[in-house]
Image (tube, rainbow, N blue to C red):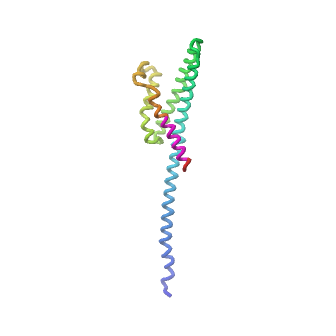
Amino acid sequence: MSTEAWYLPLLNSIPSGLIGAAVVYYFGLRQRAKERRFSFLERQLAEFYAPLAGLRKQIRTKSELREKVLAATDVAGGQFEATAEYHNKQLKEDLLPKYREMRALFTNKYHLAAIDTRAFYPVFLEYVGIWNMWLANSISQDVPTKLDHTEENVKPFYKHIEDKLQQLQDEIARG
C-alpha cells in the first residue's frame, strides 16, 4: 500500500467542491439581480406610476362630472352662471393644483420614469406651464388657443401612464 493514497480522495473532492461553489455563486448572483430588478419595479409602481395615475383619475373624474352637470343645468333657470362659477373655482383651486402635483411628482421622481415615459415630460411641462401663465394673467386669453393648448395633447401621456401601471402590476405579479 502506498503512503500517497490517503490524500487522493481529498484531492478528488476539491474539483467537485469548487464546481458546486461556482454553481451556487452563479445562481445566487442571478437571484440577487432579480431581487434588485423587482425592487426597482415596485418603487416605480408605488412611488411614480400609481400616484400619477391616481392624480390623473381624480382630475378626469371631476372633469367628467363637470361636463355632466353643465349638460344637465338649466340655462334658462339661472343656475348656469352659478354652476359655471363653481367649476371655474374648482379648476383653479383643485384641478390645477393636482396638475402641479403631477408635474412635481414627474420632476422629483424622474429617475423612476421609464425611458418611454420621459418622452412625455416636455409636453406635460408645457401643458401645465400654459395653464399657470393663463391663471396668472401673464398671457392673453387667446394665447392658449393659438398654441393649440388642449387636453388632447396630453391624452397620450395619460394613456401611457395607465398602460405602464398595468404592465408593472402584471410583471410584479408574475414574479
Magenta region includes residue 104? no
Q: Position of residue 94 (x, y in %)?
A: 55, 26
Q: Position of residue 145 (x, y in %)?
A: 42, 22
Residue segment shown in magenta: 159-172
Image quadrant assignment for residue 125: top left
* Residue farthest to the left, as pictured: 146
* Residue farthest to the bottom, as pictured: 1
Magenta region includes residue 169? yes
* Total tally of numbered discs in the picture: 0
Up/down of 158 relative to 112, above or below? above
Up/down of 18 relative to 65, above or below? below
Going 55% across and 35% down the picture, which residue do you hit? 54
Q: Position of residue 152 (x, y in %)?
A: 46, 28
Going 44% across and 27% down the picture, which residue do you hit? 129
Up/down of 68 relative to 109, above or below? above
Up/down of 79 relative to 154, above or below? above
Q: Position of residue 122 (x, y in %)?
A: 42, 33
Please give left or right for residue 61 compared with residue 18 in the image: right
Magenta region, main secondary structure: helix
Query: In the image shown, does 107 or 95 lie closer to the viewer?
Result: 95
